[in-house]
Amino acid sequence: MKKRILFITQHLGRTGSEMVLWYLLRNLNSRDYDVSVFCIRKGELFDQLPDFIEKHVMYKHSPKWTDRATRRIVRFFGKDPFQHQLDAIQRNFKADMWYVNTVAVSEVFNLPRPEGVKIVTHIHEFLSAFGDVRRQTLERVFSYSDALIGCSTMVCDKISDLNDANVYLQNSFIDTDTIHTDPQKIQEIKNRLGILPDDFVWVVSGGARYMKGLDYVLPILSHFNDKRVKILWLGPQLDNGLEFYVNNVAQKKFPNRLIFAGDLSDDYYNYMSVSNGFLLLSREETFSLVMVEAAFLGIPMVAFKTGIAEQLIKPGMGISVNHGDLKALLTGMENIHHSLDIDVSKIKDAARLYDVKNQLPLYKALLDQLFVQLAPNK
């Protein structure tokens, strides 16, 4: 008998948690699964779902005028449109399991539990994100869910501190087949950014914010003030006070040594390949897909011990240091500058463990395991 799953997620856009789910949905076998997907908003991958998958967008954000009209009618009669829509989907689809992708879809956890349906929640968040949700929401996640999946060992450990039953690991992962670089474009980028052959460039990827360690840039540049060291920051600029402060102080004291490249898409891997080393300065990461991408490109890494840094970075690949230990971080960077014991092939091989080709079979096996373990007679 086919397994029937309703996946509930934010938008099926190109964020880490959504991409991991996208890879799974694209590869589920229609002979084994009947699948329905409910998105709060319609992301760019929504229309690319396989034909056998039933698709829904929340009434409020649906491109269909009939859905928006239904929402107005439901509200007129004093009912909750969100609950009405999911109740209707469940009545018609008759899912055996609801799979909630991230705590961010908090509306689900305020609904009455659907009768006879098992609830699985995939948690991609950590302590800082927990601080952004209401206490009642997180409490409800743990009481509502029959099983919890963490995106890394670190996340699973924190989940287990609250609820040590039915906690499962499914690492996040990337698709290395989509990672391509062009030597000519890389050189063009270097020319455009004013990067010279004897510059040593460290790349950081993420939003320019405190949690990503933007404030560490200034002491790093100060330490290497007499060296040709530059920091290339990839990711959205947030136009906040910290970014203004760091950027202006850097340009005043260390001219042209800090480069904000902005939010990139097509040329992202070419920009990353401009670098000689990868820095993870984050105060917190649940996994860090960008670290795996850097590893696949063969870039040596220096990182604080967050996400999978300690698991991924082994001797010959770089170093991970205790968070806040700037002295150890700088020493690690100096070692990379001198290419001490760096094995590029080892770095690339480490990334392949977190490739879709290795992780997807584990993901499918976990789904099958959950159906067995959460069956009514268990």
Image (cartoon, helix red, strand yellow):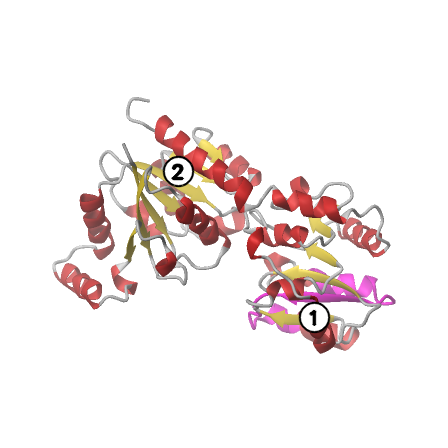
In which quadrant of the rendered image does the N terminus lie? top left
Q: Is residue 306 left or right of residue 257?
A: left
Disc 2 marks a residue whose amino acid type is: Phe
SS for callout 2 = helix
Density class for disc 2 (Cα within 10 Å; few <14, some 14-19, many ≥20) is some
Disc 1 marks a residue whose amino acid type is: Gln
Q: Is residue 337 above or below residue 146?
A: below
Density class for disc 1 (Cα within 10 Å; few <14, some 14-19, many ≥20) is few
Q: Is residue 231 left or right of residue 160?
A: right
- What residue is disc 1 on? 184
Q: Is residue 117 above or below residue 201?
A: above
- Label 1 and label 2: CA atoms lie apart by 51 Å
Residue 325 % position (x, y): 74, 49
Q: Which mark is residue 25?
A: none
Q: Please tell me whether residue 360 belongs to the stretch shown in magenta.
A: no
Q: Is residue 328 above or below residue 188?
A: above
- Residue drawn at point x = 24 percent, y = 39 percent: 114
Residue 305 in sight: no
Extent of the magenta region? 216-245
Q: Nearer the viewer, residue 276 or 296?
A: 296
Q: Nearer the viewer, mark 1 or mark 2?
A: 1
Q: Nearer the viewer, residue 113 or 8?
A: 8
SS for callout 1 = helix
Asked where in the image residue 6 lies, by quadrant, the reply is top left
Q: Which mark is residue 142?
A: 2
Q: Is residue 215 left or right of residue 60?
A: right
- Residue drawn at point x = 41 percent, y = 30 percent: 369
Residue 312 % position (x, y): 66, 43
Q: Please tell me whether residue 222 belongs to the stretch shown in magenta.
A: yes
Residue 227 % position (x, y): 86, 66
